[in-house]
Image (spheres, rainbow, N blue to C red):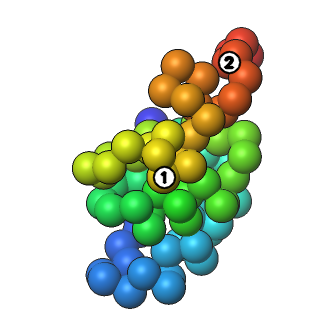
Amino acid sequence: MTVEYRWALGQYDRMPTLAAEVVRQSIAVLVSVGDEPSAFAAKAATATTPIVATFADDPVKQRLVASLSRPGGKRYRGK
């Protein structure tokens, strides 16, 4: 397992570029730590890679996920 880190250092405008850079590396999961801007950048970077995000607000209310039971809007079947 390899862990890749990217830090925006408070420069929220860099987040989409950093997220896209990590996704191009064919990752298994994208972990977004921080506030909503990092979660939105992760969501914009991929529609197929699973995203684990940490933040205080409701992800359904923020429209980051369709629902908590089916965040991608469909059932995950694995590989």
Q: Residue at x 55, y 29 (%)?
A: 67
Determine which of the numbered discs, if any, sits on residue 22 in the image. Answer: none
Quadrant housing residue 78: top right
Q: Residue at x 65, y 61 (%)?
A: 44
Q: Which residue is mark 2?
A: 76
Amino acid type indicated by mark 1 = Gln
Res 76 visible: yes
* Lower sequence index among marks 1 and 2: 1
Q: Residues within 10 Å of mark 1 (few under 14, many from 20)?
A: few
Label 1 sits on a secondary structure element that is loop
> In the picture shown, does residue 30 fall above or below 37?
above
Res 25 visible: no
Quadrant housing residue 4: bottom left
Residue 6 location (% of width, % of height): 41, 68
Q: Residues within 10 Å of mark 2 (few under 14, many from 20)?
A: few
Residue 40 location (% of width, % of height): 53, 61
Q: Is residue 46 left or right of residue 65?
A: right
Distance, label 1 to label 2, CA atoms, is 22 Å
Residue closest to the eye, 51 or 23: 51
Q: Which residue is mark 1?
A: 62
Quadrant housing residue 28: top right
> In the picture shown, does residue 57 fall above or below 45?
above
